Image (spheres, grey):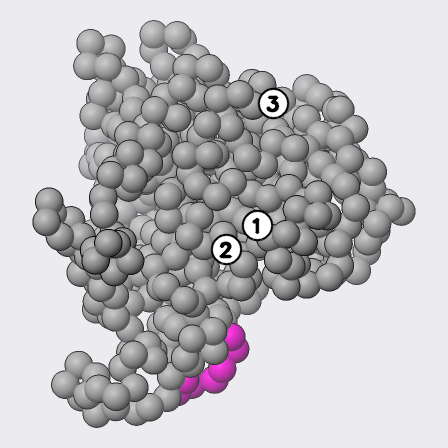
Amino acid sequence: MSIKAFFETCKENEIEFIDFRFTDIPGVWHHVTYTIESIDKDMLKDGLPFDGSSVVAWQPINKSDMILKPDVATAFIDPFTADPTMVMFCDVYDIYENEAYAKCPRSIAKKALQHLNDSGIGDTAYFGPENEFFVFDHVTIRDEINAQSYEVDTEEGEWNMSSGYQESYNTGHRPGTKGGYFPVSPVDSMVDLRAEMVKVMKEVGLDIFVVHHEVAQGQGEIGVRFGTLVEAADNVQKVKYVVKNIAHLNGKTATFMPKPLYGDNGNGMHVHSSIWKDGKNMFAGNAYAGLSETALHYIGGVFKHAHALAAFTNASTNSFKRLIPGFEAPSILTYSAQNRSACCRIPYGAGEKAKRVEFRFPDSTANPYLAFSAILLAGLDGIKNKTAPGDHMDEDLFELTLDEIREKGINQMPHTLREALEALVSDSEFLSGAMSDNFLTTYRHHKFEAQVIPDESRPTAYEFKSSYSC
């Protein structure tokens, strides 16, 4: 969409406000709104000022002025505002360095794509994330010096089987633990809610192809078509925005948190990926499962850097409570065709165009721009150095014991966010094509301060259960 077409669209739809949005390091979507009368074509070209010191882990207060650079082609009408509002994605520009801001995740994603082009390996990277989510009816959180607790509730929860749920009658139709995959209503209570989400997603430009209940109680998934790296990350922000707001408007609450329920499946963000050049899929070939050597080396690069990569793909302490055997969340670094217990699955697909790899360990606490960029950069490093991914494993890896995993010499994902961040200290060179040393230092410090240290310093309910009578 050109700037001229943008203003024509605003006029046709009687737009009153323009909402400019950008993403911070943790992946939170921020916005600033202008009246339509205050915006002209020069502002859209030159950008809009804002305070970078008020954004977490960005600028110091003595160098706080920054510029939002609107991407007019991304404009869409906000389906939730009371007054007609047009939304567009923005990149952040650094006026002190006269370049794209080194800590802007969307700008980092564009640098990763430039690194791909410069490598000569490809000119396009496609990503297809699958963002799972929970819809709950209620959540309470207590975080005090003498009390740490949470409670979530959903009408689908099997813990409500013997209660008068919310002072109403009890239907008894519930999926139960690990019983939520594909049941029809009334066991699936979210059919209409997901349908409403899909309709709104279409309004904001998302191409939807599949909608279903997921394995856990209260869990769902809405499949969005793949896109280029930046487009796919933009789409994740749209998906989260729509899912959370539709749930909210229906008196419920949605979360993409990896592991909100103990003993049931968690939320992943499985990431499909492929590299193309001159319209040809570079991942199609005659090697294992119809992959090319390039694709296998891409997998090898991701596996080689998986511990550091996890700092971006599994970006919370809660992420690693999901990555345990038995809940369809693979942590063993191997690959296999159609095998969902492997960290990397080769999905079945007819023809060269469908060839891709699916990494199943990421989750939605990841900043999508950073996670997709880091996966791409790790894969490119593997291609450059012809890194072998090891042997494929077609057995059910969830059945392996820890001793068997060690005997087979299989590497695993890190077990904590601390491990991932510490790995990033010694293994970050592969990210240098898009992420500066200053950004990486900022990222590590922020994650330690906002996630690791607060989590490690708080006692949990289970620690009281296991240690109180010591």
- Left or right of residue 330, residue 64 in this image: left
- Left or right of residue 243, residue 166 in this image: left
Work out how far the residue at label 3 is from the one at label 2, CA to CA, in angstroms: 27 Å
Q: Nearer the viewer, residue 263 or 374?
A: 263
In which quadrant is the C terminus drawn?
Answer: bottom left
**Vertical relation: 187 (above or below) 31:** below
The image position of residue 419, as x and y in percent, is 46, 34
- Give the class, few, some or many, for how many residues have Cα within 10 Å of label 1's Cα (few <14, many ≥20): many
Q: Nearer the viewer, residue 235 or 430?
A: 430
Q: Amino acid at mark 2?
A: Ile
Work out how far the residue at label 1 is from the one at label 3, CA to CA, in angstroms: 22 Å
- Give the class, few, some or many, for how many residues have Cα within 10 Å of label 2's Cα (few <14, many ≥20): some
Earlier sequence position, callout 1 versus callout 3:
1
- Which residue appears at 25% of the width and 27% of the height? 55
Work out how far the residue at label 1 is from the one at label 2, CA to CA, in angstroms: 7 Å
- Which residue appears at 65% of the width and 59% of the height? 400
Occupied quadrant, residue 281: top right
- Which residue appears at 21% of the width and 30% of the height? 38
* Residue lying at the far right of the rendered structure: 286
User: Residue 430, which numbered label?
Assistant: 3
- Give the class, few, some or many, for how many residues have Cα within 10 Å of label 3's Cα (few <14, many ≥20): many
Occupied quadrant, residue 61: top left
Magenta stretch, overall SS:
loop
* Residue lying at the far front of the rendered structure: 470
- Left or right of residue 404, residue 234 in this image: left
**Vertical relation: 167 (above or below) 122:** below
Q: Does any portion of residue 170 appear in the rendered image?
A: yes
User: Residue 324, which numbered label?
Assistant: 2
Q: Tell me whether circle 1 and circle 3 mark residues in contact (CB < 8 Å).
A: no
Q: Amino acid at mark 3?
A: Phe
Q: What residue is pinned by disc 1?
A: 331
Residue numbers of the magenta segment: 181-187
